[in-house]
Amino acid sequence: MDDNRTMAQLLEAPTEGYEDAIVVPEITANNFEIKHGLLNLVQNKQFFGHDKEDPHAHIRYFNKITSTMKFPNVPSTSVKLMLFPFSLEGAARIWLEKEPPRSILTWDDLVSKFINKFFPPSKTTNLRNEITRFQQKFDETFYEAWDRFNDLLRGCPHHGFSELHQLDTFYNALNSNDQDSLNSAAGGNFLDKMPRECLKIIESKSKVRQSRSKAIVSKVSTSSSTPAVSPDVAELKDMVRALLLDKQTSPVPAPAPVKAVEQSCVTCGGAHSYRNCPATDGNNYRDNIQEYVSQAAAANFNQGNSGYRPPPMANQIRPPGFPPMQHNSQANNQNRWNQNQNQNRGNGYNQGQIQRPQVQQHAPM
């Protein structure tokens, strides 16, 4: 039979073969409707397919949610098949969409494919090894250790360990203090009791959460050769002990002597502070300055420098704390110096007879 379709019709994408992987049985009940409240409960805790997520826990939660709703003449498995896609998101939803169409016919098929996808055999092996190598942590209480051990068992429900193996693994993983506590509660050796009695003792002890028996009591001792101490901890203890011994035997250096600071006056060079210098005391300093000016004038006059004028008193450097000179005193000093110069010029200049200015001596104050 010839195909009479056009080129455009032949190139159209097919509409068949896009069915969902989950096949939901036909529901014949009248007025069947899934409420939005049930959908919201399912979507409140969706599974994304991350490595840390537990697919077994997701199945348990989903079963609990769907069991709260009962529909007349509607099997519960049919309701689960309809609602399960709404509980997936991210990588989990992509996985379900990639499954072949109409490949999941029952609820058991869906659970089996979901668990095998997100709980592969390699993850089972790793969790079994964690259960076998379980050890109480350094500062973990008995209650915390028992709770963590049960989390490992629940995370791998198909671990295959018997109750005897579980109790024996947990008892040998405890520190010596908690083992002694279990032996005391058992009235002797804990392992001499039956498994159900041992489990009852453990459950009773785990209810006492305030009892913080630290593992540090048994794992840290004064000897680095104790088997309970790891090699890293023993090496650290030896290093600390060596540092303490070296600190005790090392001589303590004597403190360096402190040299006394000698006082030196910036005005006269004496062994005293410039505040206590006698040269800066009252009129004595002004007399010393006048003497300095007279000597400078005489020296320049002897050398023939008749045009020399001494610097004004206001420009002289004064020690700290000395009050500034008054303008009247400066003018009087300048006038006296000019009068002396005029007298010398009136008497005539004689190189053989040089009159030196008299310097007035004052007794020290």
Image (cartoon, rainbow, N blue to C red):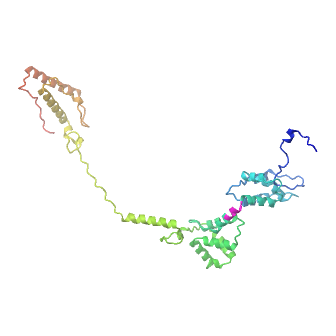
**In which quadrant will I find the N terminus?**
top right
**In which quadrant will I find the C terminus?**
top left
Q: Residue furthest left?
A: 352
Image point (9%, 20%), residue name: 346
Q: Examine the image and state in which quarter residue 203 appears.
A: bottom right
Q: Examine the image and state in which quarter residue 267 appears.
A: top left
User: Does the magenta segment cover residue 199?
Assistant: no
Q: Position of residue 354 (x, y in %)?
A: 8, 27
Q: Residue furthest front?
A: 2
**How many labels sit on residues?**
0
Image point (80%, 61%), residue name: 108
In front here: 103 or 202? 103
In front here: 345 or 246? 246
Boundaries of the magenta span: 119-125
Q: Examine the image and state in which quarter residue 117 appears.
A: bottom right
In front here: 52 or 214? 52
Q: Is residue 266 left or right of residue 127?
A: left
Q: Position of residue 200 (x, y in %)?
A: 67, 73
In front here: 238 or 337? 238
Q: Position of residue 216 (x, y in %)?
A: 53, 67
**Residue 235 can be seen in this image:** yes
**Residue 67 can be seen in this image:** no
Q: Position of residue 292 (x, y in %)?
A: 16, 32
